[in-house]
Amino acid sequence: MMDRLRKALDPPPISRNANLLRATQENVDESESFQHTAVLSTTRTFEVDARALRIAGVMPQDASGPAGHAFKMLRTQVLQRMRVSGWNTLAIVSPTPGDGKTFTAINLAIAIAGDTNHTTLLVDFDLRNPSVHRRFGYDPEVGVEDCLRGMAPLAAALAKPSGYPKLLLLPARSSVNNSSDLLSSEATRSTVQEIRERYANRIVLFDLPPVLGADDALAFAPQVDAALVVIGEDRTDRDDLVKCFELLHHIPVIGTVLNQSRSDPSRAYAY
């Protein structure tokens, strides 16, 4: 049965800046919009199985039930807080394994891609245990780790699942040894810089390993604008959560998402 969620977003830890209140879409010129459309149309598209996606907890693009509503609410709050500071990159993290960060990252990416003014790129940087491709039933020939090692261009790893017209995936192909070294490398910094600057209306989500499981998330976190922390009800230990926030003190945490909540089934993220 699909995990249940309810949002628990904290107030943003940033001050408002009137000069940054303009939606990023207003800053995109026609040529840039055309280029982005071209990328979406030429990227490798793979077919998805709707039933398999449902079993894997992946929402359809047009989800209109409780799941769609709840993730749209989450999307709106995330976009509002990122827009205030002109941000477009967000790390999805959790204190420990099993809290639901990948589930949240995928469905938040789908919800953002459904917004009129944005497209979404979901990057699987959980290089110790990549699973985004498995959730979509996709077997990539080229993974983001190959690009970071200079073995393939970034475009070769991009993929677009059918039925999600404004969602791009940058999946990892397999587990990587010494993954934190790769994530903190100059190659990764250059790749992230290219991703974040190419299209002003693109929101980039990074699915990262659990913060307390290894140093990957901490090694990579300085390269993103902010983080969203996913916690599991009756699963995440309070001390672990406190430790997670302490370790992430150097980047803004825009909020938290409570996963597997059973306290209010009527508002659960389920469809």
Image: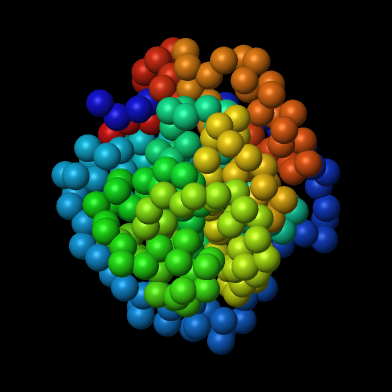
The C terminus sits in image quarter? top left
Does any portion of residue 21 appear in the rendered image?
no
In this rendering, position of residue 188 left or right of residue 39: right
Instruction: In this rendered view, identify the residue nearer to me: 193 or 118.
Output: 193
In this rendering, position of residue 63 left or right of residue 149: left
User: Looking at the image, is 133 positioned above or below residue 170?
Assistant: above
Residue lying at the far bottom in this picture: please name it: 31
Q: Position of residue 43 (x, y in %)?
A: 36, 75
* Numbered circles on residues, count: 0
In this rendering, position of residue 73 left or right of residue 180: left
Instruction: In this rendered view, identify the residue nearer to me: 142 or 208.
Output: 142
Q: Report the coloring of the rendering.
A: rainbow
Q: Position of residue 184 (x, y in %)?
A: 66, 55
Name the residue located 53 percent from the left edge and 19 percent from the top edge.
Answer: 236
User: Looking at the image, is 241 positioned above or below residue 66?
Assistant: above
The N terminus sits in image quarter? top left
Name the residue located 56 percent from the left edge and 86 percent from the top edge.
Answer: 31
Name the residue located 22 percent from the left edge and 37 percent from the top edge.
Answer: 55
Q: Position of residue 190 (x, y in %)?
A: 65, 69
Name the residue located 55 percent from the left edge and 58 percent from the top edge.
Answer: 204
User: Looking at the image, is 44 positioned above or below residue 268?
Assistant: below
Instruction: In this rendered view, identify the residue nearer to me: 100 or 28.
Output: 100
Does any portion of residue 97 appear in the rendered image?
yes
Instruction: In this rendered view, identify the residue nearer to me: 240 or 227.
Output: 240
Snapshot quadrant of residue 243: top right
Q: Position of residue 161 (x, y in %)?
A: 30, 61
